[in-house]
Amino acid sequence: MTKALRWLLSLVVLIGTVSTAGAATAATRTEPADIKDRLLAIAGLKIVEERQLVGYRYFVLAYTQPVDHRRPARGTFQQRVTVLHKDTDRPTVFSTSGYHVSTNPGRSEPTRIVDGNQVSMEYRYFSPSRPAPADWSKLTIWQAASDQHRIFKALKGIYSKKWIATGGSKGGMTATYYERFYPRDMDGIVAYVAPNDVDNREDARYDRFLANVGTEECRDALAALQRKALVRRAPLSKMYAELAEGGGNTFATIGSLDKAFEGVVLDLVWGFWQYQDEADCLTLPDADRATDEELFAFVDRIIGWYSYTDQGLEPYTPYYYQAGTQLGSPDVRQPWLGDLSRYGYQPPRALVPRSIPMSFEKHAMRDVDRWVRDNATRMLYVYGENDPWGAEPFRLGKDSRDSYVFTAPGANHGANVAGLVEDERAKATERILSWAGLAPEAAAAANAPDREVAPLAPYDRRLDREGTTLQQPTLRP
């Protein structure tokens, strides 16, 4: 009887094992093989657009996110996401600008280095990724990091290899905040030109930077042009009014055309160093000889008169809101302007409609700064020597591990790994490859002369853009 019972139990176990194996095999057979079908199988995700590219498939997606990750039952919104799909056997780069996401395919520098897939996320509250109605109190760095975390969890089942988060400027800040709140998600972080305004009340580093960047001759020439624009406020303001009227532009948010005029002019020095090269100093107009038309055109080229109109501010309301609630923003002294300035730098509160309440959380950036100093692991920061936003960079503490801060000589806000000095470029490239699990391939890269550590994918002018950020020369990172 005992033997018979044992035989029966063994038979049950065997049948169960065979059944389980059979079910697993069936599940494997029925799992969608095409990447489009696998994406469509994700709950809450829909495909808006698909394009075929050489070597890639490109998808524009809409993903359902909770407005409040702490209370997910209290409403949702559709967040725009794009996927540049190469192969599920390749690593994946998670990229964000911290602003809108482009629906035109493009590769970030780390994506080219690892020759991988790329997932790009539109930052919450940038249109169209905005709840309706918008509860602006839910626009925080933690909520945005939680958006990124949910997208990662949704896609990790498809892209199971290593992941690296990246971004330029506010995107570099975003990658840092994501790592701070979800340090187990990514295998590495590559943050470009990311400002770190730890104490929003103290901006002396920006003042010292602007007092020493470039040559004295260039600084003097820029200051003279800035002064001349304010001296000629009346005729230039008339030209500004005509330009605004012709374009249907208004000034309700900032309060007046005069405030907008001064805001643009006060951004001139910062905007020049943010996006121009030192060689461009040789092409500056002569402040004393320039006509009103020439001066007006020069300011427009460097900053853009449109930037402080209601229509220029509105797309960036989410940034200005965050700058005035958590991120902080520079308040630069420009003593060479003397009493020509009537208003000084406009704070973020002046650039956000009054219908949106704001209050500043002074501990948010201190928390992130402290966390990076004490916990940075596999994090790389790249700054530009001549970029004002790098005056307050992220720094590493004694407990950081496998993390680096490099500065590209002579570079502006478009600084990247390719612009680093040779040793640092090789080191940064090698570490990115290693974090992506590809270090052995780097040493044998066919496109690298003399076995130099180099990006695994060759340059593609259709996908690879110069620099790391879109040109947005007003006082925004």
Image: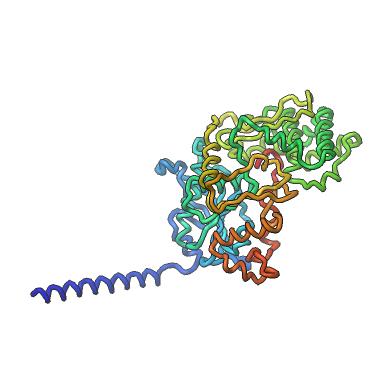
The answer to whether any part of residue 130 appears in the image is yes
Is 34 or 466 nearer to us in this picture? 466
Residue 446 relative to residue 67: left or right = right
**In the image as oriented, which residue stretches furthest toward the left?**
1
The quarter of the rendered structure image containing the C terminus is top right
Q: Residue at x 71, y 42 (%)?
A: 473
Residue 91 relative to residue 73: left or right = right
Q: Is residue 308 above or below residue 17?
A: above
Image coordinates of residue 181 in percent, x first then y, are: 48, 45
Instruction: State which quadrant residue 82 falls in.
Output: bottom right
Residue 475 relative to residue 229: left or right = left
Q: Is residue 1 above or below residue 416?
A: below
Q: Which residue is drawn at 66% across and 52% down?
A: 468
Is 252 or 457 nearer to us in this picture? 457
The quarter of the rendered structure image containing the N terminus is bottom left
Q: Residue at x 15, y 73 (%)?
A: 6
Image coordinates of residue 32 in percent, x first then y, are: 44, 67
Residue 111 relative to residue 238: left or right = left
Image coordinates of residue 258 in percent, x first then y, are: 74, 28
Instruction: State which quadrant residue 218 falls in.
Output: top right
Q: Which residue is drawn at 55% across and 43% down?
A: 373
Is 341 or 242 nearer to us in this picture? 341
Image coordinates of residue 168 in percent, x first then y, are: 63, 49
The answer to whether any part of residue 178 appears in the image is no
**In the image as oriented, which residue stretches furthest toward the front?**
398
Question: Looking at the image, what colour scheme do you see?
Answer: rainbow
Q: Is residue 439 above or below residue 124?
A: below
Instruction: State which quadrant residue 307 falls in.
Output: top right
